[in-house]
Image (cartoon, rainbow, N blue to C red):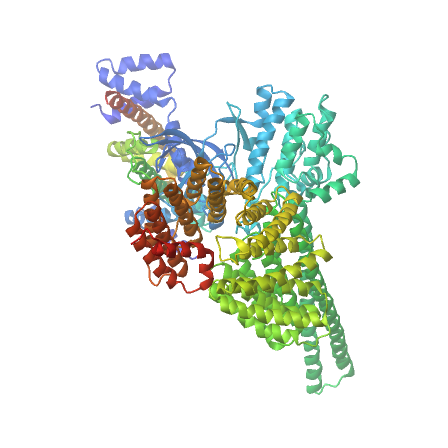
Amino acid sequence: MQASEPITLALQGLAKGDSSAFDKVMPMVYAELRNLAGYYLRQERKEHTLQPTALVHEAYFRLVGQAQPEYQNRSHFMGVAAHAMRQILIDHARTRNAAKRGGGQAVFSIDECMDAPLERPSALIQVDDALQALEIQDPRKAQLVEMRFFAGMTAEESAEALGLPVQKVRAELRIAQAWLKRELDNRNKSQTQVENQA
Amino acid sequence: MNDWQQVQQLFLEAVDLPLEERTRFLERCCANNPELLGDIESLLEADSDSGESIEMAVQSEGVSLLDNHVLIGERLGMYRIVREIGRGGMGSVYLALRDDQEYHKEVALKIVKRGMDTAEVLERFRYERQILANLDHPYIARLFDGGSTADAVPFFVMEYIEGKPVSVFCRENGLDLRARCELFIRILEAVAYAHRSLVVHRDLKPANILITAEGTPKLLDFGVAKLLSGDMDDRTLTPNLRPFTPGYASPEQVRGLPITTSTDIYSLGAILYELLIGKPAQPIESNSPSEIERVVCDTEVPRPSLSLHGIPSDLDNIVLMATRKQPDRRYQSAVQFAEDIRRHLDGRPVIARQDSLGYRASKFILRNRLQAAAASVVATSLIAGLGISLVQTHRANAARANAEAERQIALQQTSRAEAAGRSELQQKMVADQQRLLASAQRDEAEQQRAIAEQRVKEILDLAGSALFDVHDAIAKLPGSLSARRTIVKTALQYLEGLEKQAGMDDSMRQVLCAAYYKIAMIQGDPQGASLQDFQSAETSLLKGESLLMPAYNRNPNDATLMMRLIETRASLAELRYRSGRRNEGIKTYLDLIPVAHRLSLSLDKGCHLECKTQEPALENSLTYEVMASDPEQALNHANRGITLEHTLLAQNPNEPVLIQGLGSLMAGGAGAYRMLGDLEKAGEYYRASIAAREELLRKDPSNNLVRRSLMINYGNYTTLLGNPWSPNLGRPAEARIYGAKCVALAREIAAADPNDVTARHDLGMSLNRLATIDPGPNGTAESLAQLEESSSLIEPIVKANPQSAEPADQLALDLEYEGHRLESLGRKADAEAAYLKSMAVIQSFMDARNSTVLSQYLATEQSLALFHAVNGDKTSALNLANHSLSAAESYSDQSPRTDIQTLNLAKAWSTLGVVQSKLGMAEEARQSAVKALQLWDEIKKPGLLLPFRQTVADTQALLNSPHIQ
């Protein structure tokens, strides 16, 4: 598959620690994920709900294909894809939120739209905010969370991608998850207080 | 701030310890640092379900990205989406709140699923919206609004129904049989309404019929409904867009056969079954197509009473009749279905019971109740036969082409073999054999093609006439409109298919043209009952014409082709004329005259009298079309037609078709003479017309068309002889004789069908013509009685047609003359009331363009002015006379004035003069009279003056009056 050539090269660069490789892979993966999401949107799916993680896996097969047996490349790809997926979902959540606040008014309206009451932001936006806070404190943990939740990567895959022992990955993830949970709970409490004062 | 590394370390050490140990461990490690302890404790607490909330957040955002759930909580226009309440293959329905300042109303919002917005789905969606927009019934969920989202996904907003499916409602509320039947009748009302609006629901089931807490039924989900007249063609829909619910589907749905209103009747029958005994009528074990077909198409719905004792046999029969497998043997309409249940509830015999006596009885019923569904099934099956023949033609054509190709190859092989000089006998023989075989195949295919084409023509002919029979049979029945439209639509589809086939020869063109003509006459016969869709009729006629023309141009003297051309173009001319394109219509007629003349000279064996009568028939049409604009030309056409008819009558004495033509032409000529002011000649022509029609009616007393024509003849001749409101010969005694004949015939016609509105209107007119003749010395009371009868007949028609000026004008004339008669009888108050009512009736139709209404209004107003003058009410008299004058002036301010406008002005001045004179205003009266006489002199058509001879004389008398000096 010719199309897989550039991405394979870039993934190999990524494996060798070439940081500029990330910037090459990211747009390709991002575009592929968006395409896939659009493609699934047009399918009629009754019971089965597609998960973002499944989308990432599918994107790998489409971009890299099975012709690329190197396990390491796949992990690197997934790491990038996790970030891309996060980006896509956050973009979506922020657009949606903006629409709720009257930012993206529906085209059809007989009367002027009234401003909606203050709403809680999407859960994912809160997660992202918390994740950004974690990134400041401990970037690797944030990356592990991203890999785990946005690409569905196992501890082994993350370990492979980051060149860490699996045990270390497991421990770090556990800490990161607890930290995020606490952070989210605190944010929710303060949000409720703001609303009560209002 | 605690050291992050230390926190991590302690967390990992503590997290897997048993709870007691953990507490001790932490107390030991953080003894001097409560802040650190709190930090780690909170982290440990958060560890319990770590990951879940993040996973949920990612998931739900993912779902939102990939699905419509995204909508919940959003606003669309002024609607806030609350939750999903239903979901189908292509869209979802949400509960939404309209929360602007005015309303806080719950609505149902239906929107196409994201990603499902393909052109086809969007089209279907718009179609549903269109259907809903056309339905406005208390038992059908209403459409409120529509729009589209920021990314152009359309949605619409409907009434939100909080209710329960009808089956659940009946069960939970323990409704007894009677209550269930009553409720079901109301559901039928809603369905009947939808059918009247040409909508077939196609997916009726308890889940789509909700009953509100108040017990009101509401029909929902027209998502697969079908508009019988619409452009949406089911064949363009993929199968999954025309789904059905097997438990309530009809055999025709399962088999993919045409859908009519009968389809809903079947589903309703199945629902009634379920309401009666609480079990489904056609339980389906599995969703396999064979199981569905077995249950729906081959298994009769069992008698409800077999499952539940105490179900009356009437209800058994009603359910069984509604769920018959053949659509044409079910109830013919939802109304009939409802009536039958009503009959059962009232203890009267039901139709369904009669039918169960046997098939012979059902035949009888069908004959007498042949209605919508039956007809459309007959028609569609005939047309389906046509489709099969088309396929045969197509196949035969393909086979012929194939055989020809093979023959060519064989020929090539032979010649190649010869050219190569390889004269091996064997090779040449094989090639020869192939060639012969191919030739034989080609000949056979040719033959098959000829047979198939012949069959197409036969069926087309048959379908054409059958379509007409069926259409005529159902045309008068209530509710047949949708079936008639279906007939037309189906027929057109097949004709279009037929044209696309190759091998169109001249006879085929002729047949197709005839078929289009027939369809056009169903769509919009300008002179008969039709669907009144004149635009489509014109399209069909033009289509037929364009098909015919190549054949006609090749063979302009072929009698059949000429006939087709005249038939098609004459109808086109009539349609054009009637749609306001008068000159275009007249020209189309005129251009046909030479064709009709050539046709009359045709020596074709198949050319009988029909070929000869086309020319006078065209002259007859032209007579009436140019009458208003050019009476002289009208007279010419009439006279040419009359000459032709006389010639033909000399060769075919007593031929009814010719006598009928003559009668019509004579009446046309009479009208033209009347307009030209030659009343004596008009009278002569009317008498000839009357004689022709009296003769026809003697020969064929059952011919109501002739009876009505004769009645109209009598009426017009009466008016000519002595109705004072029109140019007349001043022969009231004779007029009364013909007026009486007119009334007698009108009474006969009206008595034959008491529901015939036209007949009642005709009788009212006839009585008016008789009663508005000068009644003579002792006739006043009788005249008044006749006028009162007339107005009692016309008044309901006026009320029923509030937009229509003609009946109002007629009623005003009645009332004006009631006023005159009442005045003669000395009943002054009644007379004044009658005049006032006359004016009130037509006041709203006053319009400069409608000279008839204007003249009538002014006439009554002037009568009332004179009435007041005679009775000494000076102010009223002068006010009315002056108003009448200014009204006449304001309606005739353009120049040059028409004769009618001048006439109105002259009359107004005359009246003012007479009023002034009666009030002793001699000088003013003289001046008015001078004005009036000047105006009378301006009128060019002497005939117009005749009815006003008395008024003119009175005006002249004003000048010579001794009071005026």
Please state if B155 lies on the left or on the right of A14 as rendered: right
- Which residue is nearer to you in this view: B460 or B249? B460
B351 shown above or below B637: above
B820 shown above or below B951: above
Residue B259 place in picture, x, y as percent: 62, 45
Image quadrant in which the C terminus of chain B is located = bottom left
* Image point (74%, 73%), residue name: B443
- Which residue is nearer to you in this view: A113 or B513? B513
Residue B45 occupies which quadrant of the picture?
A: top left
B447 shown above or below B121: below
Residue B596 occupies which quadrant of the picture?
A: bottom right
Residue A77 place in picture, x, y as percent: 38, 45
Image quadrant in which the N terminus of chain B is located = top left
- Which residue is nearer to you in this view: A190 or B329? B329
Residue B182 place in picture, x, y as percent: 60, 26
Please state if B852 lies on the left or on the right of B722 as rendered: left
Residue B154 place in picture, x, y as percent: 42, 43
Q: Is residue B429 visible?
A: yes
Which residue, as the protein is rendered here, is positioned at the far left?
A: B1
